[in-house]
Structure formats: C-alpha cells, structure tokens
Amino acid sequence: MEEKPSIPIDIARLALKQLAYSKVPPTPDNFRKVYDDIAGVRSRNTEFIGLSKAVDSILKDAGKARAKYLNLAKAFQMALETQDWKEVEATLRQLLPDMTSDGTSMSWGNVLRDLLKHFEIDAKNSGVAKKAESLEHLLMEFDSDPETMLRKVHELTVSWRNGNGHHLANVPVSDAPEHADATAGRVAILWRDLLIEALELGLLSQFKTVPELTRKTQLLLAQARSATTGAEVEKLGVAFKSYWRKLEANTSVQTKFNQSLLKLFRLLIENMGELANGDQWLHGQILMVQELVEKPLDLETLQDIETRLAGLLSKQGALKRSLQEAKQALKQMAVSCIELLGTIASNAGEHHEKIQQYQQWIEETQDILELNAILENLRQDMQQLQGDALRTFEELKESHEKVIAADLLIDRLSLELDQASELACKDFLTGILNRRGVDDALDREFSRSERTGKPVCVALLDIDHFKNINDSLGHDAGDEAIVHLVDVATTALRPSDLIARYGGEEFLIILPETTVDEGVQVLTRVQRELTKHLFLHQNDRLLITFSAGVSQRKPGEIPDVVVMRADKALYKAKHTGRNRVIGA
C-alpha cells in the first residue's frame, strides 16, 4: 500500500495532480477538500470557518470589558475544533439572558421590584437591617460582574421568599469575618514573598560593587521576613522609604559616573583620530568607535560593533604581518647589496695591485720567455677579473629586481591595509554593505530623490524560520544560507538596487526610482528566484524563503521613518503566513 505523504508541499502537489486527473476545477474549496482528504483531516467549509471567526471576534471584543466573554470565546473555539456540537450549543446558550423559574426573562426591573416588596414587608421589624447587610455584601462581591450580580440578587430574593433567612443563596462571598481574615492573610503572605523575591533577585545581585546598598538590602530582607504584625509592617514601610531615597541617589551617581567615562572616552577617540591623521588604516577603527559613543548604548549595537571590529582587526593584523615581512626582506636585500659592493671594491683593489706588479715585472725583465710567462699570467688574471665582474653584475641585477618587487609588495600591502579600514562598512560574511555602510547609502539616495523628485523605496526582508535552520543544521549552515540568499538576491535585483545586511538574518534593500508597487514586484521576483535555486547543504536541498515589507519615501522624510514603516510591513508579512511581500 502506498504511504501517504506527510510534508505539506507533497500533499499540495498530489492534490493538484488528483484535481487534474479528475478534471475538477482547482477552486479553493475543491483544493481544500482534496488536500484534507489526502492529509487525513476533516474538512471545514468556507462559510463555517467565516461564521466561527465572526463569533470568535464578537466574543473577544466583548471580552475587553468582561473577562467572561474571553472564557466563552476559548470554550467556543475548543468545541468547534473537536466538533463537540453539544458543547457549542451550551456555550452559545450562556449568551442568552438568564430566566426565572417561571420562564420569564430575568431583568433588573423585576429583581428590584421583588427587593422593594421584601423591604416593605419587613419595614416594621428588625429583619430589614440584616437583609440590607446581606445585599450590601453581595453588591460589593460582584461589583465587576453585572450579569452574575443580577443572578445572585435574584437568588437572594427567592431565598427570602422561601423563608430561608437572610443569607445569600449559593453566593461564595466573604460574609464571614473568619473567611475574610483568612483570605486577607493569604494575600498578605503572597505580597510579602513577592517583595522578598524582588529584593533578592532584582536588587541584591545588582549591588555587588556597592557594599553599603548590599548591607541595607540584606537588612531589609531580614526585616521583611520577620514582619508579621501591623506595627512591624509599618516600620518596614518607613525603612523602605529611606532605602528608596538611597537607591535613587546611587542611581544618580552611577549615571553621572557613566556619563563622565563616556565623555573621557570620546575625548580619547577624538585625540587618537587627530594623531592618526597620516595612518589611513586606523580610520575605520576610530570611526566605528566614534559611531558607538555618539549614540545611546544598547547591547545589540555593542555586539554589532564588536563583531565588525574583530573582523577588521583580524584582516588588518594579517596585512600588517605581511607588510613587516616584506619590509624585513627589503632590509635584508639592502644589506646584501652593500656586501656585494664591498666585495667588488675589494676585488678591484686586489686586481689594481696585481696590475702594478705585472707592470713592474714587464719593465724589469730582459728575457723573452719570462715575458711570455708574465703575459700569460696577466691574461689569466684578467679573465678571472672579467668572470668576477660578470657574476657581480648578475647578482646586482637580481638584487635590484628583488628590491623593486619588494618595494611594489610594500606599496600594495600598505594600500590594502588602508583599504581594509573601508571594510568597516562591509559585512565580513557576505561582502555586502553592513548597517553602517547602508546608512551612508540611504542618505545619498534620499538626497538624490529629494533633488530629482524621483521616488525611492526601502525594503526590509527577513529569512523565514532562520532559527530552525541554526538549531537543526548548525550555525555554519545558517551562515551558508545567508550567503546563498545574498547571491541569489544580488543576481535577481536590478543593477541600480543595493542590498545590505541589516542584522543577523535581516537585510535592507534600497530601490531607486521605484514606487511601492514596483518594489513589491522586485521582491516577489527575488522570491521566485529562490524557489528555482534551492539551498544545498550536505546533499540536502532546502527551500529558503523570506518575508518582506516595502515602503516608499515621502517628500522630506528621513531614512529612519521610511525604514520603520517598512519594518511594520515586514512584521505584518511575518504574521500573515510568511513568505510574503507587503507594501506599506
């Protein structure tokens, strides 16, 4: 027997094949019916779903004012999901007005008339006071629930009519002092435990570097644990007022301390920038730190700067090591050249002395045979001198070429070191602009749009279920998925479009001379390309999808406003099914 598919995309593919084979039009209702049949679930028609959504919406709107209707909405949906029609009927009946025992509709008019009758009957005896007390307890207990209050007041009048005294009928109100005291005691204990927990977990751990506040917090904890009487609680309240004042003063001191440190750090960075004016390779690092201290600090910004700075320092460190090696090699070659020139000078001196000696021997000799021997020796020495000169020339030529190559290498490495500073604007994983780089690009494109009057759009896209990829396949696979999306998107986008990595799995795309509708079409085209180019990981093919929001800049708007609007559209796309593009 053929096994039924369990993956939704396989079920959908099989459903379409079955519709085509049966020659049934592929309408949404027909598709849903065949899909549910293959998946082995019971179908629900469109009208039924619409009705259930309408009832659920009405109950939830009513639940904003009355918690009862929220509970009914939950019960209604649960009954629908299990198709428990008796429970559906019972839930809907709770929406009807309560009925009295004689079948008439329960209303405040009828209940109040019954109350007045009972008070008129007992007006001349002492029963009125007790009835009034019972009624007052009931009204206080159900002050926030008018419908329950109506039912309970009706039950109270019925109990009076049946002669059951002046007690509340089936009303779990606090009419007994013992019950009220017990409830109040439990609530007080809960509040005390919450207070102790807040002190221990929320405050004590924050004051490890402030001994005085640590000691005061510990004293308050001991006092809170032992407070059991009203007087002790009052003393605890006084102690807390003093404690809050000291805490506020410490917060003010810490704030000023942090601000002073930040100012000192800014001055240091500015001074470093002036001192490093000739060292281009330092500019990227200084700019990143300046960007950090000029904005309000938050954890995400700190982590982003840390990652970018670590990557930049790593690349610059490798280039600096190569540069040092090239400089050392050049220095060694210079030493070799000097030694070679010294050798040439030494050899030239020796040959000069030999030539003078030969000249003296030639002048003094009178024997032709001796003269021939002297000339032969001179010829051999001249050949040796010529050979030494040729070898020295070749060595000098080789050293000169090495010096030129080393000099070129030093220039290239110096240029790369300076250019590495510019990589502070690029994402090290994908090579596209990072958040800092895209800020400059946004300012540039928005200025052009303001100048020319042509539209410009910003799109924010976020990879769907990226956390699942990281958790199931590992972070390396997650990085590969990001690179895959960037490669496909870069190919699918127009030459004028610019994509940048805006966060972990979030990307920003600038779409010049583009309206919001055109921007949606561009992003939809990127989605189609992703479906054609599946992500390959260890021989497994995975479909990477994304959700996106697109917003068009309005005249005079700054980038932050447009990006925020795109982010809201992205949020909407994420929460309406994912793998969607929505225009703002």
Image (tube, helix red, strand yellow):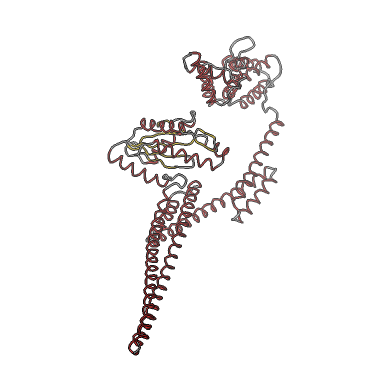
- Above-or-below relation of 109 to 304: above
In the image, is 246 to the left or to the right of 401? right
- Above-or-below relation of 235 to 415: above
- Residue closer to the observer: 243 or 489: 489
Q: Quadrant of the N terminus?
A: top right
- Residue closer to the observer: 107 or 463: 463
From this viewpoint, which residue is outermost toward the left?
452
- Above-or-below relation of 163 to 431: above
Residue 222 image point, x, y percent: 68, 49
Which residue is drawn at the image coordinates 52% and 55% (left, top)? 253
Quadrant of res 168: top right
- Residue closer to the observer: 576 or 374: 374
Residue 336 image point, x, y percent: 42, 70
Which residue is drawn at the image coordinates 43% and 57% (left, top)? 266
Residue 179 image point, x, y percent: 70, 30
Q: Quadrant of the C terminus?
A: top left
From this viewpoint, which residue is outermost toward the top?
102
Residue 149 seen in this snapshot: no
Which residue is drawn at the image coordinates 53% and 38% (left, top)? 537
Residue 272 image point, x, y percent: 42, 60
